[in-house]
Amino acid sequence: MIRKIGPTEIRPLHKASCHCGAVELELSLPEGIVDPRRCDCSLCRRRGAIAASVPLSGIRIVKGHEQLRLYQFNTHTAKHYFCGNCGVYTHHQRRSNPEQYGYNLACLEGVNPFDLGEVPVMDGVNHPSDREAM
C-alpha cells in the first residue's frame, strides 16, 4: 500500500485521465495505491505501464465514456480500455481477478510513476489462470 509518491499525496478519491483529457476517471483509493506492478505478458510488455488494483466499484468514468475503446485478446476474459483519441491505456478489468480493475498509475493526476522506484514484475507469460489446479 502506497499513500504518497514523491511529492504527491494519494487522495481517497483521486482523478485520473488520458493524455488528451478526453477520458477522465475518478478512482476510490481509500488505502492508497494497492499492489503496484508491471506484467510481462505480450500486451503489457508493449505498453509498459505500471498498474495497480481497485474493486470494480473503485472506478467511475466521469467524462469520455464514448471515447473509450475496448481491446481483448487470447481468452477474451480481460477487458483493456484506452482512449480512442490519444491511445493511452487507462484501465482494464483483470483476467486473474475479474472483480477488480487494474489502472494505469501514470494516468493519476499529479503522479509520476518513476517516483515509485523498483516495481515488481508479474509473470503474465505464465498467467495464473493458465495453470492447472493442483
Image (tube, grey):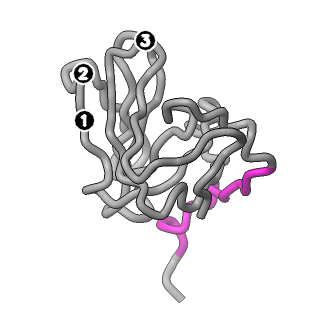
* Rendering coords of residue 128 (x, y %): 54, 68
Residue 87 placement (x, y as % from top left): 45, 17
Badge 2 marks a residue whose secondary structure is loop
Q: Quadrant of residue 91?
A: top left
Q: Are marks 2 and 1 in contact (CB under 8 Å)?
A: yes
Q: Say which residue label 1 marks.
A: 61
Q: Nearer the viewer, residue 99 or 30?
A: 30
Q: Does the magenta-highlighted stretch encompass residue 89? A: no
Residue at 48% of width from left, 16% of height from top?
19
The residues colored magenta run 118-131
Q: Quadrant of residue 106?
A: top right
Q: Is disc 1 placed on a helix, strand or loop?
A: strand
What separation in Å lies between label 2 and label 1 (alpha carbons)?
7 Å
Res. 64 mark: 2
Left or right: where 121 falls relative to 87:
right
**Mark found first going from the N terminus, 2 or 3:** 3
Residue 16 vs residue 44: left or right? left
Q: Earlier in the sequence, mark 1 or mark 3?
A: 3
At 54% from the left and 72% from the top, the residue drawn is 131
* Residue 122 is one of the magenta-drawn residues: yes
Q: Which residue is depicted at the point 51% across and 57% down?
A: 32
Majority SS type along the magenta span: loop
* Three-letter code, disc 3: Cys
Q: Which mark is residue 20?
A: 3
Where is residue 90? Give x, y as percent. 43, 33
